[in-house]
Image: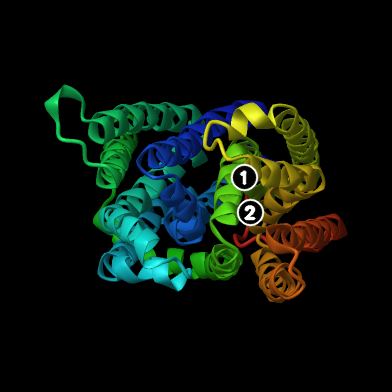
Amino acid sequence: MSNHKFNLYKLAWPVFISQISAGLVGFVDVAFFSQVNEDAAGAVGIVFPYLLIAFMLLPILATVGITVAAQLTGARQTQLVSAAYFGNILLCTIIGAVLGVFTWFNADQIGLWFQLSDELNHYISEYLLWMSGSYLLLAVSSAYAAIIAVKGKTVWNMYVAMAGNVLNIFLDAVLVFGWFGIEPMGIKGIAIASLIAYLLGLLLNVYLVHGVERIRFTRDDLVKQKRVFLLWVKVGPATMVEPMSYVIQQMVVMAMVAYLGVTAMAANTFVWRLLFVELAVGGALATAAQIMLGHYAGSRDYSLAYDTLSRSLKLGCSFALGNVVLLIVFRDQLLGLFTSQPEVINLGFQLLLMCLIMEPFRQINIIVGRALKAVGDATFSAAVGIGAMIFVVPVAYMIGIRWEYGLLGVWAAFLGDEILRGSVNLWRWRSGRWHEMAIIEQAPATS
């Protein structure tokens, strides 16, 4: 049995605030983009799948360390926990640096990959050039935040995210509007504000891990990396396949949205921004459940695992449905924060109607998908992700482009994707086949 006492709500609500703060950075950035150029704000939404490489893949990569460290702790093999932390930081640093360098050298081409016009690509290339540094900062910061989370101190991550968010909003206003005598920097200012905010988050996380928690890495942790890596490869590659396939899928589909025109780009971008609160809830519940399930899988407490996931799903799906209803009721006011164009608001309203069905299934997909990874069944989740990519891209093209249903056709493919993945992942969880897939052998209890 597990010796660790967890509370889903106590773990999840700080993660929720953290993700709201992180999402609010994107929300505010788009709002400031709209002040510079509304079409450029829509273009940001089109290239957002590329930005997801940093904003989604790197934090998910860091959660592999959560899975390994949590199962080590649950299985009472604490002698490897520190080495797992160190290995996670090392890997995230390398991948963040590689992605940052790649983005720097290709900033002027990435917008063209999404079929943006030369004019819109000019805005995007300037933004990406400055944002390329965020990959390394976010990668290392995410690895440190994962250490804090696996120790149950998610409230600290919340405070760090809030501090970064407040700084980002303040610097956006200063650098875009030219406060305090500073020359207005436009889009470059938005990117610089985000970079400084990410740097603050990294410094705070490093202080919390080494200064407050007193975690120290030694030569012994480096020597143990081979053993830790062998544990990591059991779940790491499969964990990354699903989100990577999702990013590739979104990059291809967003190129289709760009083909559909400025109105489709704007509506797509603005509705996604309105959904960020609900996505933060799903991410928070999934992260909290992942921490708990990692411990329970290590200690073989299957009844607690089932109960944890059931409560997470009830909360996530209920919130998703209620949130979409509110967005529909107040659609004119909320979409009006970004645009005054009636055609964009009307198209956004139609997308929100589709979300009534799509978002509860998205919650199932997010929460159960992360749960399967936490208990060692990441390979199945990866296979589902690849299958979904193969399904969505041609279906979105057929309905949206060939049959000329436009953005609604593309989102119909999204709807089918979420229903399919959510249903299949839930079936897998309920089958119980993950019971024997824990990546750590349980150590004998000591008296």
Quadrant in which residue 427 is drawn: bottom right
Image spot of residue 155 (x, y percent): 48, 27
Provide residue 161's location: percent of width, then percent of height. 41, 32
How much space separates mark 2 and mark 1, taking CA atoms?
40 Å
Q: Quick check: can you spot residue 91? A: no
Amino acid type assigned to the residue bearing label 2 in the image: Ala
Kind of residue at disc 1: Val
Q: Residue at x 62, y 52 (%)?
A: 444
How many labels were placed on the picture? 2
Q: Circle 1 — which element? A: helix
Residue lying at 44% horizontally and 57% vertically, measured from the top left: 51
As helix, strand or loop, the secondary structure at mark 2 comes to helix
Judging by the rendered image, the residue that carries numbered circle 1 is 344
Q: Dot 2 surroundings within 10 Å: few (below 14), some, or many (20 or more)?
A: many
User: Mark 2 highlights which residue?
Assistant: 374
Q: Position of residue 225 (x, y in %)?
A: 37, 65
Q: Earlier in the sequence, mark 2 or mark 1?
A: 1
Of residues 231 and 197, the one nearer the viewer is 197
Q: Are marks 2 and 1 in contact (CB under 8 Å)?
A: no
* Residue that lies at the very extreme toward the front in this rendered image: 342
Lateral position of residue 206 relative to residue 84, left or right: left
296 relative to 409, above or below: above
- Which image quarter: residue 279? top right
Q: Choose mark 2 or mark 1, whichever is in front.
A: 1
Q: Front-most of 374 and 413?
A: 413
